[in-house]
Image (cartoon, grey):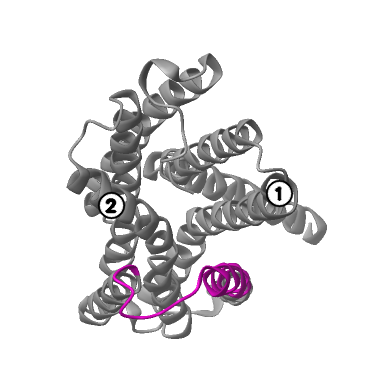
Amino acid sequence: MLLTSQPQGDHIPVLMFVEFVAEIIMNCVIVVLALWVITKVPFRNDFHINLRISIINIYLVLPIIAVVRTILIIDVFADNRLPVFLTSVAERLFFWAQTALWFMQMPSMVERICATIFYRSYLHWSARGTSAVVMLCWVSSILTALEIIKVTPSDMYIKTGGGTLFILFVYIVIFCLTWKHYKNRKNLQNLNERYQIFQNVQTLYPLLWTIAIELIHNVATMIEVIIYVFVILPKNDLVEYQILFGITNVVRECLLIGYCIPFFYFSPNRRRVQFINKMTAEAQNSNKLYFKQLERQW
């Protein structure tokens, strides 16, 4: 949906004005949080280089969505006085970036599959394979946006929804396999293998969070499309359209903010404290077990 049917300038209803201002504020928050993640992740030495590349690749799209959406809102406030070329590019970028956000999930999924299957040697892998997958995703999304690769809106919804469910399924399988390896880690004598398995478990939590948000976004989009096609379109009611449009935008911005939360919650310091507490608890349990065994022998 475009902004062309929206009331312009001084004719903007109060509720829509509030919604636009809220969107601008949330978009500023999205840009700050996304840039924070992009600048901090490269220094996360507890992440493999391939994982860092995959995460940065996802979060590069978020500021683009926020900035171009803000440009479109400013154009409404300015009575369409911004250059036509600028607003045209912003609209195309806005819809491309929303699709690209899904495309950019692919490298992280491939990276985690490799880390799970080849955990014995993955610690020494280079970044060439992940870089190639990232470039392939960017080329595919750009060709789709330029309509060189023809995809109808209905096909895009089906592929995005089905693809998200597939990615979620793959991550669940990866998590189960990783957890199985983690439970059997004491049988491994190689410290590199034990370290890689521990890292695989720890890094899956934020990635599962982003996939869950993507799934919620797809469900919300499908609900929006159903309401638009079966409720609003037959009535041709501009007010209901504006309400739906506003709710959709606010929900999207809230979900994009949620994208950045995992890297605040799953921080290295928090994980280090949890690891120390766990090791302390295991040591205490081992001491208690030792003294109980000694007492029985006595």
| Camera-side residue of 221 and 109 | 221
228 vs 158: above or below: above
- In magenta segment, residue 147: yes
Name the residue carrying label 2: 44
- Which residue is identified by label 1? 227
Q: In the rendered view, does 22 fall on the left or right side of 165? A: left
- Where is residue 155 drawn, in percent x and y? 55, 75
Amino acid carrying mark 1 in the image: Ile
Where is residue 57? Give x, y as percent.
30, 61
The part of the chain drawn in magenta is 145-169
The answer to whether one can see residue 221 in this image is yes
Residue pushed farthest right? 296
Say which amino acid is labelled 2.
Arg
Main SS class of the magenta portion in the image: helix
Whether 278 is among the magenta residues is no
Image location (x, y in percent) of residue 71: 28, 36
Compared across the picture, whether 240 is left or right of 109 comes to right
Q: What element carries label 2?
A: loop
From the viewer's perspective, tell me whether residue 24 is left or right of residue 87.
right
